Amino acid sequence: MILNATSMQAVTWGGNPLQVNVSTLPIPEILDSTDAIVKVSLSALCGADIHTYNGVYEDKEVPWVMGHEALGIIVEVGNSVTSFSIGDKVVVPDQASSSLEDLSTAELTGLGLGSDYFLTTGCQAEYVRVPFANDNLFPIPSQSDDGSSKSAIENIDLDYLLASSIFATGWGALDLSGFQPGDSVAIFGAGPIGLMAVYSAILRGATRVFLVDGDRQRLSIAEGLGAMPIDLTHSDPITKILRQEPDGVLRSVDCVGIEAANRLELKEDKVLQNMTAITKVGGGIGRVGKFHDTSDSMSTSPWQYILPTFQLAMSGFFKKGPQVRSGAIDSALIAPQLIEMILKGKAKPSFIVSSIIGVHEAPEFYERASQHLETKVVIKFPFS
C-alpha cells in the first residue's frame, strides 16, 4: 500500500438496535487488479442505514461498516483500472464498494472481532475499496481551474454526493410512474427520497406536485420548492387532492409513504389504496422502497409489524387501468445526467442536507435521524 496510514475511523453496526459505533479499523488494500482505493471526504446517512440502526435487518453477519454513498479522491488503483487515476475525484454509488477486505483470523482476533467477522458495502469510513472501479465509480468534473473558492467547491461536492443515491432514486421513482413534462403528480412520503422526487418533478416540468406526509417540517421544505403539502394528520389526502384535480393526478409515486401513514394506523395497503383513488384513468403509479416481513426482527421502528402483503380492490384497479411499476433504481443509469445538471448549475439537491458532522458525532446523529429530526446527514472526514 502506498498510503502512510494503516488504520482508519469508520461507523460500524454490531447488531444491537439503536446503536452504532465509531471504530478504528485497518485501511483496505487492493485485492484485485480492478480495485481502487478511495479516500472519503463526504459520506451520507440514508434510509437503509436508519432501518439497520433500528434493527430491521437480520440477514447479515455483524459487525459491518455503515453507509453506501460517498465522495472522495482516488489514492490507489489496481493494474486493470484504466478509466481513473490517482488524484481523481469520484462518487462511490450504491452497492459498489467494500470498506474492508477479508481479514485473516489472526487479524480479526487482534481487533477483538472473532473469526466470523464480516463487512458488507460500507462508505462511512475514511477509506473504501471499490471493486470493478472502471464501472463502479462516477467521475466528478474538475474545478481546479475555474477560480472556485474552497467553500464553493465543498458546497457543490455535497450536490455531487447526493446524485449517486437519493437524487437518482427520487428521479427514477418518477420514471417508474411514466412521468413526462407537464404531468401532475402526487408523492407519498416526505423522507429524503420523497423530497428528491418532489424536486425532480419540479425540475422536470410538472404542472402540479402534491406531497403527502405527516411531518410538518418536511412538508414545509416541499412547499418552499413549489409543491402543495398535504398533512395527513389533519386532512384526508384523497379529498384534498381530488378537490384540486377532480379527474385525479396523472402520476402517483410511493416513496415509502407507509412510514408516514403508519404513524396513524397499521395498514399495509393504505398508501396503495390512496394512490389508486387519486390517480387519473390511464395514469401511472411508481413505487420505490423495499418492504420486509419484520415481525420476527428486533426492529424498534414504528412500522416493525408491517408485512409485505397488500390488499387491494381489483374493481377499482380495473376501472382506472393504471400503469404500475415498482423496483430498485439503478443509479448508474441516472447519476451521470444529474452530475451534468449540477455542473451546469441546473440542479442543487444539497438543500436537503440538514447537518454536516464529524465521524465521532455519528451515534448522536443516527439517533436524531431515526427520530425524524434530520432530513439528510452528511459525515465530513478530514482530508490531509
Image: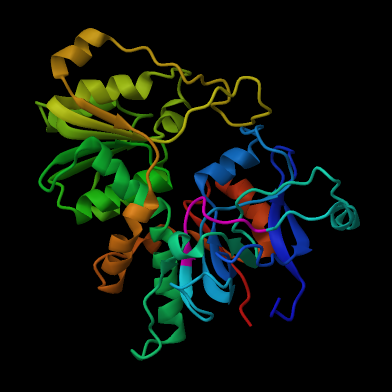
18 sits left or right of 238 in the view: right
Q: Is residue 318 above or below residue 259?
A: above
Q: Is residue 98 above or below residue 251?
A: below
Q: Is residue 268 magenta?
A: no
Q: Which residues are magenta?
A: 91-99
Task: Name the residue located 21 percent from the left edge and 8 percent from the top edge.
Answer: 315
**Where is the N terminus found, in terms of image quarters?**
bottom right
Query: 286 and 299: which one is in front?
Result: 286
Question: Which of the two residues, 176 or 136, is positioned nearer the viewer here?
Answer: 136
Q: Is residue 382 left or right of residue 249?
A: right
Which residue does the image show at 50% across and 78% down from the upper left?
85
| Residue 209 rendering spot, x and y as whole percentages | 21, 43
Name the one closer to the observer, 152 or 374.
152
How many marks the image carries: the answer is: 0
Considering only vertical position in the picture, is 14 above or below 163? above
Residue 193 in view of the camera: yes
Q: Is residue 308 above or below residue 368?
A: above
